[in-house]
């Protein structure tokens, strides 16, 4: 386990102390561990959401490329068909 030493502003230290005195936490360390754990959990979710959004945007771009390629192929096929029809008449 890693140990950290931090300096807190007086107002934050008093708030932490009040949580312990109110019986919400057993110690100041428990308050800090809960706060850090929540911070990490929330940021993990934010990071996962960002990656999901990036994946969705990538999929949209790929779908547009595929549609453009299909449209181009379809147009080329139609052009060839029209050319054959003209030559036949």
Image (cartoon, grey):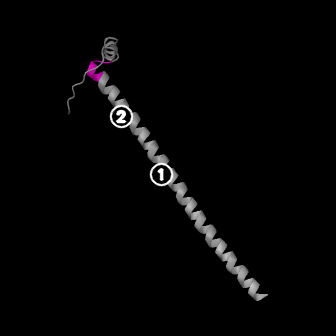
The residue labelled by disc 1 is: 55
Residue 27 on the magenta span: yes
Determine which quarter of the picture holds residue 87: bottom right
Please tell me in which quadrant of the rendered image residue 73 appears.
Answer: bottom right
* Whole-percent x, y for residue 15 in the image: 34, 15
Q: Which residue is mark 2?
A: 40
Sort mark 2 into few (<14), some (14-19) or many (20+) by Cα contacts within 10 Å: few
The vertical placement of 69 against 42, above or below, is below
Marks 2 and 1, the one that precedes in the sequence: 2
Between the C-alphas of marks 2 and 1, the distance is 22 Å
- The front one of 62 and 31 is 62
User: Which structural element holds mark 2?
Assistant: helix
Q: Within 10 Å of the Cα at label 1, are there few (<14), some (14-19), or many (20+) other Cα atoms?
A: few
Q: Say if the magenta span includes residue 80.
A: no
Q: Secondary structure at mark 1?
A: helix
Which residue sits furthest right? 89
Residue at (61% x, 68% y) in the render: 70
Please identify the quarter of the rendering in which residue 86 is found: bottom right
Residue at x 32% of width, y 18% of height: 25
- Residue in view at x 30 percent, y 17 percent: 9
Q: Position of residue 80 (x, y in %)?
A: 68, 80
Q: Which residues are magenta?
A: 25-30
Residue 55 against residue 38 in the figure, above or below:
below
On screen, residue 84 above or below 54: below
Image coords of residue 52 (percent x, y): 47, 47
> Between 36 and 89, which is closer to the camera in this rendering?
89
- Asked if residue 70 lies left or right of residue 40, the reply is right
> Which quadrant holds the C terminus?
bottom right
**Left or right: 58 as drawn, with respect to 43:** right
């Amino acid at each position: 386990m890693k140990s950290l030493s931090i300096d807190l502003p007086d107002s934050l230290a008093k708030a932490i102390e009040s949580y312990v005195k109110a019986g919400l936490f057993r110690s100041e360390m428990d308050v800090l561990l809960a706060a850090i754990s929540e911070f990490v959990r929330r940021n993990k979710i934010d990071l996962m959401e960002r990656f999901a959004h990036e994946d969705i945007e990538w999929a949209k771009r790929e779908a547009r490329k595929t549609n453009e390629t299909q449209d181009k192929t379809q147009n080329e096929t139609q052009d060839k068909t029209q050319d054959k029809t003209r030559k036949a008449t």
